[in-house]
């Protein structure tokens, strides 16, 4: 096993662990690393498949906190966003995706510091805001396998409770990931390399998810968030250097 392969295994395991423990998106940590390691737009499809695994495992414990009306608006916007994102994905180069991922990771790094939680920036959650958030999430799912950042940013701006935020992120991801993969498959196809990468990376993702669930209540969440911030900054720097 090469050093790169070992590093990818460690990253996806750690990303799944953090997803289970804190709710921070698996894709935004593992996705950029896969993009760097594979050097191919197929890395986005691999990330989509792998990101679905922790979402499926974790959704049962969070589903009760989800708001059906909120999800309806977000997913309605995401439907249009997925179509737009698929077109962008089909025309994007690896360099385009790398810069897009760097911007998204840096934005999420800022959010993970928690400074924005000191005050609510938007007093009322409008339907238009929800639809636009869903639209952006759909575009980012199809292009970068990252549905979470727009929803997380919107939830922080409107002061949405953490339990509802996590449940919303999980459900949006579970709907958007398969839809994005189907659309990409119809437009670009799915290569054997995607299947191969997913098969050997799925076990560490599953292991990381269950490990994160096991230690979630025993390690301070603030410590996890600090680790997430450090990881995001390192990933963003690696993307820029690449």
Image: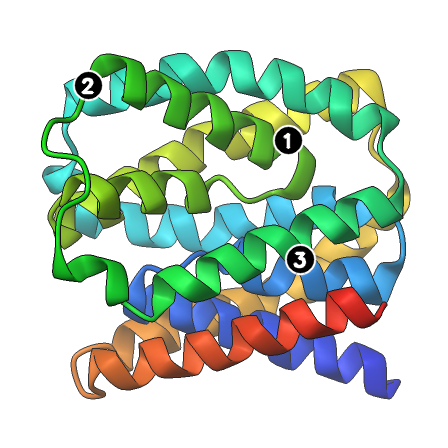
Query: N-terminal of the two: label 2 or label 3?
Result: 3
Q: Which residue is mark 2?
A: 126
Q: Is residue 163 above or below residue 76?
A: below
Nearer the camera: disc 3 or disc 1: 3
Whole-percent x, y for residue 98 in the image = 77, 53
Q: Which residue is mark 3?
A: 102
Which circle marks residue 142 in the picture? 1
Does the residue at mark 2 contact the one at mark 3 (Cβ under 8 Å)? no
What kind of element bears circle 2? loop
Position of residue 182 measured from the top left corner of the image (x, y, whole percent): 66, 22
Question: Along the line of sight, which residue is nearer the eye, 152 or 142?
Answer: 152
**Does the rendering let one see residue 13?**
no
| Mark 1 Cα-neighbour bin, 10 Å: few <14, some 14–19, many ≥20 | many
Q: Residue at x 82, y 54 (%)?
A: 196
Quarter of the image where one finds residue 74: top left
Where is 195 relative to 77, above or below? below
Q: Quadrant of residue 170?
A: top left
Image quarter hosting the N terminus: bottom right
User: Of helix, strand and loop, which one carries label 1?
Assistant: helix
């Amino acid at each position: 096993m090469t050093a790169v392969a070992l590093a990818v295994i460690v990253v996806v395991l750690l990303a799944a662990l953090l997803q289970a423990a804190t709710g921070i998106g698996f894709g935004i940590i593992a996705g950029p690393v896969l993009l760097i390691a594979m050097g191919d737009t197929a890395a986005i499809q691999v990330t989509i498949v792998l990101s679905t695994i922790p979402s499926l495992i974790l959704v049962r414990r969070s589903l009760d906190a989800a708001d059906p009306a909120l999800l309806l608006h977000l997913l309605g916007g995401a439907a249009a966003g997925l179509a737009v994102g698929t077109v962008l994905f089909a025309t994007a180069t690896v360099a385009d995706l790398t810069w897009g991922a760097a911007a998204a990771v840096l934005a999420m790094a800022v959010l993970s510091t928690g400074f924005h939680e000191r005050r609510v920036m938007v007093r009322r959650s409008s339907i238009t805001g929800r639809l636009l958030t869903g639209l952006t999430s759909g575009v980012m799912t199809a292009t970068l396998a990252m549905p979470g950042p727009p929803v997380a940013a919107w939830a922080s701006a409107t002061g949405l409770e953490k339990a509802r935020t996590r449940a919303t992120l999980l459900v949006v991801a579970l709907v958007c990931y398969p839809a994005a993969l189907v659309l990409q498959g119809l437009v670009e196809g799915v290569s054997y390399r995607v299947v191969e990468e997913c098969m050997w990376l799925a076990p560490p993702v599953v292991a990381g998810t269950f490990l994160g669930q096991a230690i979630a209540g025993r390690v301070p969440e603030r410590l996890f968030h600090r680790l997430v911030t450090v990881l995001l900054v390192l990933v963003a720097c690696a993307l820029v250097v690449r």
